[in-house]
Image (cartoon, helix red, strand yellow):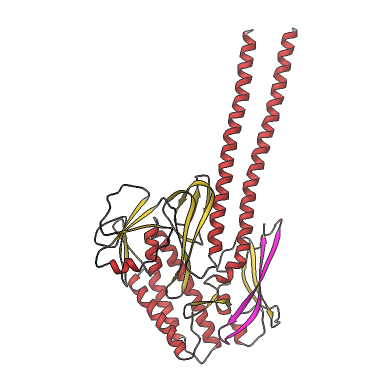
Amino acid sequence: MKKAQIQIQETIIVIFIFIIILGVGLVLFYKFNESSIRQIEDDDRLVYFYNMIGTFPSMPEVKCSSLGDEKECIDVSKLIAFKNKGEFFKSNITIYTVYPERPNIECTIQKLNSGQDCGTFPVFSNIPKTFINKRVIFTPVSLYYPDRDTYELGKLVIEVYS
Amino acid sequence: MQYNWAFVIIAGAVILAFFVSFTVKYIDIQNKKDSAMVASEIYNSLFALQKSSYQTETPIDLFLRTDLSFSCDKLEVGNFFSEALEKEFVFAPRSLFTDKIQVFMKSWKYPFKIANLFYLTSSEKKYYIIFDASSAEFVNSLEFPKNFNIIKTTTKPNLNDPNSRIISFTSQNADVKITPGENGYATINNKQYPVLGLPLVYGAIFSSDYPCILDRLLAKFSNMIDIYSAKVDYMSALNNNCDYSQLKRTLSLLNERIKSKDYVSINEYSRTLEEQNNNLLNSECQPLY
């Protein structure tokens, strides 16, 4: 084989390897950017839940009102009716009565009617079978019992899964 | 010598093609990324506003000037990224090209609160409101946000501008013709749609997709009635001194009328519900809402 032919073959191999390295770089770059877009979506979802800690008690589905005027509390009767009616992605939303202290038993109309003590209001549950992260966000809320016209202190707990 | 030239041309073309495809992909990804950030910015701003109980006017400043396409339950940013608006009720033009969105928010109560409604526009959009002597009082009672380009006129402008929308409160036809009143309706493309309360009058003015958003709102109205029906059950079970049976019946009839799209009856039952709710307080009972 002539020396010139060997040189050309060497050059072809060098260019071939160069292109492969560039190709791998391109794929990695593409994947990195795709994941950064997914990251924006994930962050977006997390911001949604951080905002939801403020917006959930303001939802007309659960918020107290009197003759159309909104009040800063959660109406327990509406809360019971709203159970699993909303759609909140992969999360678990529950309200616990904090004061006065009550047992961790789900409140239903039947239980309240029979005078049974209860203090838990499950709102929504969609816990994935597998998840990487679980974040818990909570805030105090005022719970209003319209039948007794009394207020209790509660804790809204949102568990976000990703 | 010829072989060398062929080699240089082929190798050069391959490397050039690589860089071209890299650039195209980079631009595509960057556009997608920017669009995702804009969509996220808009969505989170609207979602944060949901907690407001009051009528609100606020701008959303975007970090880039871009194309926004609004449909009934979706926002598309620059054809690269779309964000679902399934829980929000956004009345907006079909398309906006802007870096600053003007937002106006109002609660829809009929008679109880059903949802917060968002009205979106930009400074490029103009709304011509045509009125006559019979509708002047109603048009003057409408409260438009300061940053919305509203031009009230008695003569129909001769325009062919995609950034202008003509709303008629007279007998003249326009993009939307609104007949206000107790059983008011909006005429869009020769079809009539009800305007249940003032917030929906604004909805018909600012939205290019009013019929679809109206359907979604009625579905939400129906869901809210289910919640209030359950509250009636709760109150009836736990508070025996008060009679909630009339309210329960009205709620049930109202829900039936919503499902059958009997808009005149919806208005009537809504007023009956309000009356019955006020009567509860007169009988020293807890009102329903």
**Which quadrant of the figure contains the N terminus of chain B?**
top right
Q: Is residue A162 above or below residue A105?
A: above
Please tell me whether residue A136 belongs to the stretch shown in magenta: yes
Residue A33 versus residue B157 in the image, above or below: above
- In the rendered view, does B15 fall on the left or right side of B84? right
How many numbered badges does the structure rendering display?
A: 0
Q: Quadrant of residue B237?
A: bottom right
Q: Which quadrant of the figure has residue B108?
A: bottom left
**Residue B111 location, x and y as percent?**
42, 75
Percent x, y of residue B9: 60, 17
For residue A28, say whether it is visible. yes
Q: Which residues are magenta?
A: A132-160
Q: Using the image as rendered, state which of residue A63 and residue B253 is in the foreground.
A: A63
Residue B280 location, quadrant = bottom left
Percent coordinates x, y for residue B283 in the rendering: 46, 91
- Residue A134 spot, x, y in % from top left: 70, 60
Instruction: Report whether residue A1 is seen.
Output: no
Please tell me which residue is depicted at 44% across the width and 50% down the height of the picture: B96
Against A29, residue B272 (above or below) is below
Q: Main secondary structure of the magenta part?
A: strand
Please give the name of the residue rendered at 44% of the width and 63% of the height, measured from the top-left corner.
Answer: B216
Q: Is residue B1 above or below residue B55?
A: above
In the image, residue B261 lies in the stretch drawn in magenta: no
Comparing A1 with A58, the one in front is A58
Foreground residue, B144 or B118? B144
